[in-house]
Image (cartoon, rainbow, N blue to C red):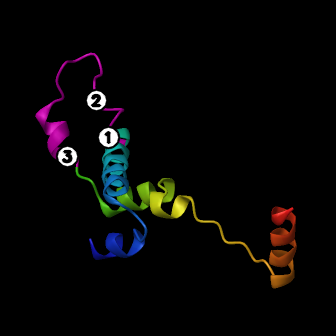
Amino acid sequence: MERIAKDTHGYVGADLAALCTEAALQCIREKMDVIDLEDETIDAEILNSMAVTDEHFKTALGISNPSALRETVSIDVEMFGVGIICFLVSD
């Protein structure tokens, strides 16, 4: 959990919920070959063998994007460029 906390800088509650959902889906995807989709229920033995692991979270972290950092753009602008932009905007 400490590693996940360190790796989720910029995540808000909804991002963490999505991360957990994606990790759980990764776990389910691994078992899709033994789950009979025609049945209305999943065998208890299959369910008991399923557990979300650190690897599932690592995969989910590679897919997810923290919403707090999604809009952040870093621009390297020199003061001369800022002056030109201010001049153009003022016209």
Sequence-earlier tag: 3 or 2: 2
Query: Is residue 24 left or right of 75 when viewed as pictured?
Result: left
**Which mark lies nearer to you, 1 or 3?**
1
- Mark 1 to mark 3 CA distance (whole Å): 11 Å
48 falls in the magenta region: yes
Q: Is residue 79 above or below residue 73?
A: below
Residue appearing at x 87%, y 73% in the figure: 84
Residue appearing at x 33%, y 63% in the figure: 54
Circle 1 sits on which residue? 28
- Mark 2 to mark 1 CA distance (whole Å): 9 Å
- Mark 3 to mark 2 CA distance (whole Å): 12 Å
The percent position of residue 63, horizontal first and vertical second, equals: 49, 53
Is label 2 in contact with label 1 (beta carbons under 8 Å)?
A: yes
The image quadrant of residue 55 is bottom left
Q: Is residue 75 above or below residue 33?
A: below
Q: Which residues are magenta?
A: 30-50
Q: Secondary structure at mark 2?
A: loop
Asked whether residue 33 is in view, the answer is yes
Query: Is residue 32 left or right of 64 when viewed as pictured?
Result: left
The numbered mark at residue 49 is 3
Q: Residues within 10 Å of mark 1 (few under 14, many from 20)?
A: some
Farthest residue to the top: give it: 38
Circle 2 sits on which residue? 35
> Between residues 15 and 77, which one lies in front from this camera angle?
77
Q: Amino acid at mark 2?
A: Ile
Q: Secondary structure at mark 3?
A: helix
